[in-house]
Image: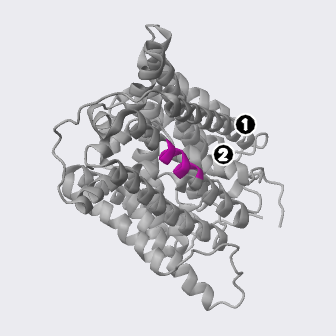
Amino acid sequence: MTTGKPRLLRRLGVRDAALIVMGGIIGSGIFMNPSVVAQKIPSALLIMLVWCAGGGIALLGAGIFAELAARRPTDGGLYAYMRDAFHPALAFMYGWTLLLVSQSGGMAAAAVTFAAYFGALSGTAASTALVAAIAIALFTAINALGVRSGTTTQNLFMIAKIVAIGGFVGVGLVATPGRHEVTAVPIETNALAAMGLALVPVLFAYSGWQTSSFMTAELRDPARTLPRGMIAGVIGVVALYLAVNAVCLRVLGVGGLRATATPASAIAQLAFGATGLRIMAAVIALSTLGFLSNQILTSPRIYFQMAADGAFFKQLARIDPRTHVPVMAIVLQGTVGLIIALSGRYDQILNYVTSVDYVFFGLSALALIVFRYRDARDPSAPRPALQMPGHPVTTVLFAVIAWAIVADVLIKSPVATAIGLSILVSGLPVYWMFTRTRRRSVGAPGPPAPAERS
């Protein structure tokens, strides 16, 4: 039933969802990651196969999230899937980690990267910390004006990134290939093992599609809109990534790609000299700014839903009657991102949680199995508009891959991973504190029920 209270408004469509998906994935990494992969793989064909495999795995993940959205078009996206499939405490731990490290750390890294490029391009002596702070504050203010304002800004940046990447690919297709000696980089002799090593950075480059699910409450007909936007957005990213890698291999070759940490800049310099370096610096600055815009748009919706469920500060569940957005949640996200940016510890913070996303990706696959099991026994459950092809084989395969990445990171960086998991687990006593206080105030014996919105 409709009430007189301010509500989140369903103003976003399929195009918005697709561009939010792309904006959550594409940052500045694609302009540098091709060289990381080339250092592990001996041939151009295998390099392209790894990026194709990564794209296929990303599509598996998108398919799982698309069916989750179709079956449970619930406010809060991934947070809500964890809450409804498993337990509200697990969902809270996910949101807690987003706020403390992953989303806020990613925001801080994007803001500082943009500030560094801005200083170099403008020739000003402005403080990097000051420019980063202004960028975070600006996007926080834009998103506080309304979901349409924040989404339009994010969309414009994403369209500009698509145009810029398209221009880069066009230049690469006509540029004269450079001559590069194959450097003596130690490479795994077993091609399959080498591809496995290279797949980890590729999959991290493809991750980020899950943030679009945070916007469920503001999508029109989310059971259809979000699945379509999810699949279209990931397909768009795969096409752009494959095009960038093909151009890098055409112009630089495997040897040249291994020899540079900034392949996109190397190609721009071959084509346009020193001017090319400035152009590519501007493109990377634009890409990081767009990523920052995406993070401030999407992540506050999780904290809002946590508060609406009675598991976080109640002020975060308030919706501004004029803008119809959770302004306090947006301000909280901007503030934490700003603190991390000014602390200069964002790189270390991101190292702590490189595996956390994939922990929850694997759990999302299990959530789909849980929901399918429940719906099969509920005659009133609606049939979803989209279903995961090949389920349950493809769903289990994605879960295995996700947790294999977690294991790989744990083996390679045990201390950082342990710290990340400790931050995740630290959410449990905080959840207990909030829910215990709420139960005392309302006299309810059990955990908070998911909030409903008419």
Mark number, residue 431 = none
Q: Establish if 345 lies above or below 198.
A: above
Answer with left or right where residue 80 lies relative to residue 48.
right
- Residue 325 colored in magenta in the image: no
Q: Is residue 238 magenta?
A: yes
* Kind of element beneath mark 1: helix
Q: Residue at x 40, y 71 (%)?
A: 399
Which mark sits nearer the N-terminus, 1 or 2? 1
From the viewer's perspective, is residue 193 above or below residue 388?
Answer: above
Residue found at x 41% / y 26%: 265
User: Percent x, y for residue 202?
Assistant: 38, 51
Q: Which residues are magenta?
A: 236-243
CB-based contact (under 8 Å), mark 1 and mark 2: no
- Residue that badge 2 annotates: 326
Q: Quadrant of residue 254?
A: top left
- Say what amino acid the circle numbered 1 marks: Ser
Provide residue 145's location: percent of width, then percent of height.
72, 35
Cα–Cα span, label 1 and label 2: 14 Å
Q: Secondary structure at mark 2?
A: loop
Residue 120 located left or right of residue 232: left
The N terminus - image quarter: bottom right
Helix, strand or loop for the magenta stretch, by majority: helix
Q: Nearer the viewer, residue 256 or 410?
A: 256
Residue toward you, 319 or 300: 300
Q: Which residue is mark 1?
A: 149
Give the side of residue 374 with respect to residue 341, left or right: right
Question: What's the amino acid at mark 2?
Answer: Pro
